[in-house]
Image: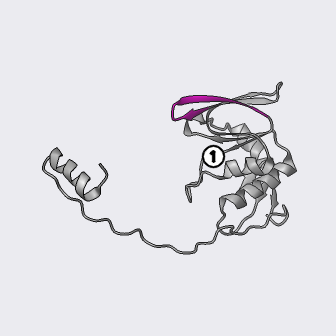
Amino acid sequence: MAFGKQKVLILGPLLPLSVAKILRALAQAENPGLLILGKQAIDDDCNQTGQMVAGLLKWPQATFASKVILDKEKQEVTVEREVDGGLETLCLDLPAVITTNLRLNQPRYATLPNIMKARSKVIKKVTPQELNVEIKSDLEVVEVTEPPKRKAGVMVSSVDELIDKLKTEARVL
């Protein structure tokens, strides 16, 4: 996991809260004005880390950003996000946490001089212990069971028969 000029060395699986605690510690150490995170993890499909980081840091957040406009003079960021009813625009004071939507990305390809400059940058490696973050599972799996088997469906030949079965057997009408 890389953050700014630091790289965290972790062995084993991480849950969203552990990742959020690591990111909080790194944000407190480096004091960034803006954290931009992905929408959800690809390993467990959770959509939690960005919101947890914002909560731990007590920073404002905008989720599912499809457009971001940064105003350094006013120290604020305007975020356009997709919601069920269309688009929503939020204005946040910095520092803030933003999670992204797939429409935000317009890839830029690195030029050779910038690749060479990046190679010469020093990345400090730190462990969670050096950040005073304990990596532990806050969840315990008590039991895993299969859902009950569904009963076979019944074919009906007409709408009248369907209504009759819904009234008499299912008692939903």
Q: 72 left or right of 104?
A: right
What is the chief secondary structure element of the magenta stretch? strand
Q: Is residue 159 above or below residue 87?
A: below
Identify residue type, mark 1.
Gly
Residue in the image at 68% along x and 48% along y:
50
Q: Residue 77's spot in the image, x, y percent?
A: 74, 30
Q: Is residue 142 above or below residue 92?
A: below
* Circle 1 SS class: loop
Residue 22 picture quarter: bottom right
Farthest left residue in view: 157
Q: Residue 33's spot in the image, x, y percent?
A: 81, 38
Farthest bottom residue in view: 143
Q: Residue 114's spot in the image, x, y percent?
A: 73, 39
Quarter placement of the N terminus: bottom right
Q: Is residue 52 above or below residue 147?
A: above
Residue 124 picture quarter: bottom right
Q: Residue 52's spot in the image, x, y percent?
A: 71, 52
Q: 144 left or right of 19?
A: left
Label 1 packing within 10 angstroms: few (<14), some (14-19), many (20+): some
**Foreground residue, 112 or 18?**
18
Any magenta on residue 57? no
Q: 168 left or right of 61?
A: left
Residue in the image at 80% along x and 59% along y:
125
Does the rendering let one see residue 123?
Answer: no
The residue that mark 1 highlights is 38
Q: Which residues are magenta?
A: 81-93
Scheme of colours in the image: one colour
Does the rendering let one see residue 159?
Answer: yes
**Foreground residue, 91 or 1?**
91
Q: 37 left or right of 155?
A: right
